[in-house]
Structure formats: C-alpha cells, structure tokens
Amino acid sequence: MQTDLQYELQGDYYVIAGESEDERPPVGIWGQRHLQWLKQNRRVTYTNLLTAGRQNAYLRNIDTQANEQLELLIQQMAEAEGVTERLKAENQMKWVRQMSSIRARAEAVINSELIWC
C-alpha cells in the first residue's frame, strides 16, 4: 500500500515529514465535530485517514464545506422568512430571535447531512 506520506531522516530514524502544525490552517469546529463522530462511529475510516496522512486535509475540507453551506442556508432561510436589514433597523429583538432560530435550524441541517454521516 502506498501512502502520500513523506519521510525525512532525523538522526538514526526516519520520521514523517511535512508541514508543521504552525504552517497548517487549524481544523474548525465542524471538522472537529466530524472527527469526534468518526472516532465513535466509523473507526475504520478514522484509522485509514490517520494512517494515510490525509486526516487533517479531509477534516479541513469538511469544515470548509460546512461553513459554506451554513452561510448559504442562513441567507436562503432569512430571505424566505423575510428577515431583512430593514427589520433589523426597526425591531432589533425580533431580528435577533429570528436569526437565532434560523442559525439553529441551519446548524441542525449541517449536522445531519454533513457532519454525522
């Protein structure tokens, strides 16, 4: 089995080479949630990603997709429900309530369709 891992000689041992943790963008909350789900429910997939050296790239991709879908869902739901900047200016508390509800429902969709599958 061939992996995409690169090795470098350090002293008498070969160690996995690559970007240091400081050079990689961090995995966001959605990627972290998916990682926990993988550890609990899909141990083989988790182990395969880890041993192939693709786990962080995979999780960053999930995180990016989730963030993009979340923003799109929030925008679409707000438009469909008439939550506008005008409402925000006229009645801030109503706007906050509606946007909080929209965000919670959008997060539930992301969880069920992308994170926990």
Image: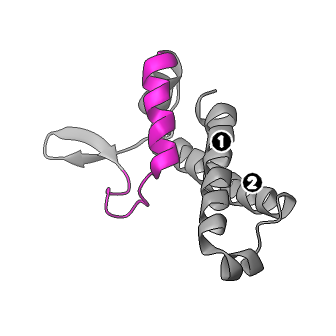
Mark 2 or 1, nearer chain start: 2
Residue 30 drawn above or below residue 114: below
* The C terminus - image quarter: top right
Look at the image and give the residue range highlighted in magenta: 18-43
Using the rendered view, name the quadrant where residue 5 is placed: top left
**In this view of the protein, can residue 90 be seen by the observer?**
yes
**In this view of the protein, can residue 52 be seen by the observer?**
no
- Amino acid type, label 2: Leu
User: Which residue in the structure is indicated by mark 1?
Assistant: 110
Residue drawn at the location 49% of the way across and 31% of the way down: 49
Residue drawn at the location 37% of the way across and 57% of the way down: 19
Secondary structure under tag 2 reads: helix
In the foreground, 107 or 36: 107
x and y percentages locating residue 114 in the rendered image = 65, 37
Residue drawn at the location 62% of the way across and 55% of the way down: 67
In the foreground, 49 or 98: 98
- The colour mode here is one colour
Using the rendered view, name the quadrant where residue 36 is placed: top left
